[in-house]
Amino acid sequence: MTTSPPPTATRRHTTLATELGDLLAVAEGDALAGLYFPRHWHPPAADAIGPEAPSTGDPVFESTRTQLAEYVRGERTSFSVPTVTHGDAFSERVWDLLMGIPYGETTTYGAIARELGNPGLAQRVGQAVGRNPVSVLIPCHRVVGADGSLTGYAGGLERKARLLEIEEPAEAAASRLF
């Protein structure tokens, strides 16, 4: 993940049709700056996404669509699409930590807060996780409640469950009764 100056006129957006549903993709230069599900809790402002652009012929959008399809098919465990975010220092640190959560594993808001050096920051961590601008590629779906339960997800709990199901180890999936 790269942090750079605030957004510029190089922003553009498109809608990507994926197995996860339609996603609003926002590119900034040669990087993905946003990936949002419909009814996302914290969507970008209309004036912050740039003009609409075709999803084909744009290397950022094409790479994002291709890598998401590979991920859903179980052929990809990490993403190489360059991303750019523009959060405050705390949010950027949280998003960097999200990138370190291995595929197929989860952590808790409290564990991230402890990693930041203050267990009392769990709620603030949750706020930063919920404002992650690049869903899926920055894997905020891998953060669960202290008891392992699925908790808020800006793209909806059913999507969070689906993303975790995609990443579930085969042996764990085989041991489930339903």
Image: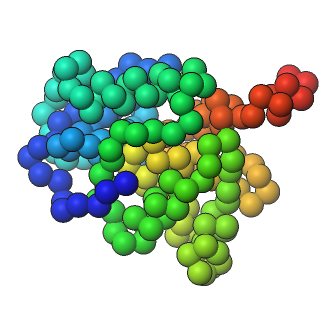
Task: Give the tally of numbered discs.
Answer: 0
Left or right: residue 41 compared with residue 9: right
Q: Can residue 127 be seen in this view?
A: no
| Residue situated in front as seen by the camera: 134 or 171 | 171
Q: Residue at the left extreme? A: 9
Question: Which of the 4 image quadrants contains residue 1?
Answer: bottom left
Q: Is residue 74 visible?
A: yes
Question: Which residue occupies 28% across, 29% down?
Answer: 61
Image location (x, y in percent) of residue 6? 18, 60
Left or right: residue 124 compared with residue 65: right
Left or right: residue 178 compared with residue 46: right
Question: Which of the 4 image quadrants contains residue 13?
Answer: top left
Question: Which of the 4 image quadrants contains residue 25?
Answer: top left
Image location (x, y in percent) of residue 63? 33, 28
Question: Which residue occupies 64% across, 29% down?
Answer: 166
Question: Which residue occupies 44% across, 21% down?
Answer: 18
**Display coloring:** rainbow
Question: Which residue occupies 8% across, 46% down?
Answer: 9
| Residue situated in front as seen by the camera: 3 or 157 | 3
Image location (x, y in percent) of residue 46? 21, 41
| Residue situated in front as seen by the camera: 71 or 90 | 71
Task: Locate the C terminus by quadrant.
Answer: top right
Q: Relative to 99, does residue 94 appear above or below in the rendering?
A: below
